[in-house]
Amino acid sequence: MIEVKDVSQSYGNEEILHKLSFTIEKKSFNVISGESGSGKSTLLSILSTLLKPTYGKVFYDGIAMGDLGNLNKFRNQKIGFIFQFHYLIAHLTVLENILLASGKSRDRAIDLLKELGIESLVNRFPHEISGGQRQRVAIARALINKPQYIFADEPTGNLDSKNSDTVFSLLRGLDATVIVATHDKNRILKSDNIITLKDGYLC
Amino acid sequence: MLRSLLHYHYKTLLIVISTTAAIVSTFLITALSNGIVQMYSQMLKTDGDIIVMQKGVADTFFSDINLSLSQKIESIKGVAKAEGVIVGAGKISKLPIAGIYGVTKNRYKNYPLSKGSYPEKNGEVIIGKNIDILLKHPKKVTIFGKNFSVTGVYHSDIGFENGAVVIAISDAQKLFHKSASFLLVSLEKITNAKPIIFAINRLKKDIIAKSTNDFIDNYNQFKIIRISGGVIASISFLMGFLAIVSIMSLMINDRAFEFGIKRALGISKLKIVFEIITEVLALTIFSFILAYLISLIALYLLEHIKMFQGYLSGTIDSKLFWELLAGSLLMAVFGALVPAVLASKVDPIELINRGQS
């Protein structure tokens, strides 16, 4: 479970998020929605420990972010990321990209690629595969360490509707707490929990 | 690692070129300055145990000492022989400058002949093998406008002696207007040196006697060569260091996105710093091996270019090799450390955004 208490975020004098409080249940599928510039990506960065809030606290199963100890280790073992752009490293193969955060799980990587239907791409480079395939590789990379929490920032922003459907159905089927930031209204309806932001406020 | 270096091949190549150039120049400058010092040291060491020269002059070239002093020195107990030498340089035939050694008759044998015979009378000269080649086997040479007959050609193991001529000291006295530059004293036993040096120094107030080893250790020209060589080598090394820092900064900026992703995936700052330093160390080791091979080839060529008359000679000894390897690796670590630490400190989101922009 993730508990957000009075979280605010400022850059200089500008406050981006204003005293947000909400709870995300374990193994639920959650959507953070809102227009561009509403603060979705900033909130996602805070929830995923990439950004420390200027004010307020975030608890993970009752433990405050500041008390988690080594955040790198926490991120590596408990969190999986899927970005709007696939963010695969160009000079690494599909397999090497997946193993970037976990060098010893080759079999797991192959299993994931099979599950995602892209096992034949194992030795290809990112520029040799399609946009939809790249995003599936990014999903495999996010899942390699069997994380408790999956964060996805506009994961289908660069995909056509067919590939978008595939990615969302994959995300919904995951055995983890999934938090997706999107402004795609068609996707919002099929979630367990919707967190809607407008100008940094919860609606 | 290799793949990421090849991916950024242009910047990788720049690092290799700048590091190799810095190491090659350091190798060459140090080896050549050491070579010059070693050649002259070897000449003095093999020719005598004690050197006697004029007191208070900076260089043997400027020293003027009375040759008759050699007879008084030879009368000191424990002295085997004392020989006078005049060292100078000047125009020889069409060569703008070459070494000129004026020696007493008993020193001719220090210059082993490859052809001909030693001079018998004034006006005769033996020439080094490089001079013989450069002047195309001359029968006569002119020194300061005076003609000398060539009686033989010598070959010395000390490279720059081959780019010189050897004449009778009486001829040299007329050319350089001095009695002798210095006296070289050979002892019956080297262990007797201290009391003999003391006895020689008591003969005249305006002379100074030193063991050749002491002389070499304190010779101003050697100090100047070593210091100048050290300064130039340090500057070129610093240039290499600055090149690594600046190119690595550019490369890290190019790879901001990659490091941002790694940070977001939970790879620690330390691991990222370690990865960058490992890459630079690998490049430096490659550059070092390349630089060592280039330096060996360059030193071989320099030693065999006729124009330099054997004056440019240098070897890379194990001390220089290991010192420069250690220095290069330190240069790589410190050169990469600053940009690597800066990159690892930046927020992953900022790195990703910077890399995408």
Image (cartoon, coloured by chain):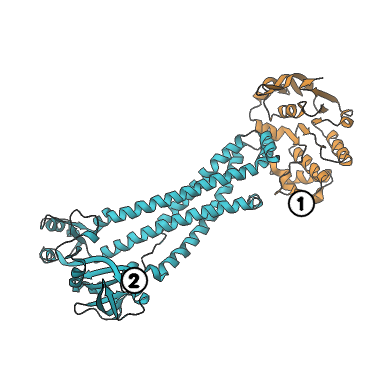
Label 1 amino acid? Arg
Q: Is residue B265 visible?
A: no
The vertical placement of B190 against B19, above or below, is: below
Label 2 amino acid? Leu
Give the chain ID for the orange colour.
A
Name the residue that disc number 1 marks: A124
Chain label for disc 1: A
From the viewer's perspective, is A68 left or right of A201? left
Chain label for disc 2: B
The vertical placement of B125 against B295, above or below, is: below
Residue at point 43% right, 58% down? B28
Q: Position of residue B198 (x, y in %)?
A: 14, 55
Residue at point 38% right, 67% down? B308
For the residue carrying disc 2, how many other residues have a C-alpha within 10 Å: few (<14), some (14-19), or many (20+)? some
Q: Nearer the viewer, residue B43 or B248?
A: B248
Give the chain ID for the cyan colour.
B
The vertical placement of A100 against A53, above or below, is: below
Which of the two marks, 1 or 2, is nearer to us in this view? 2
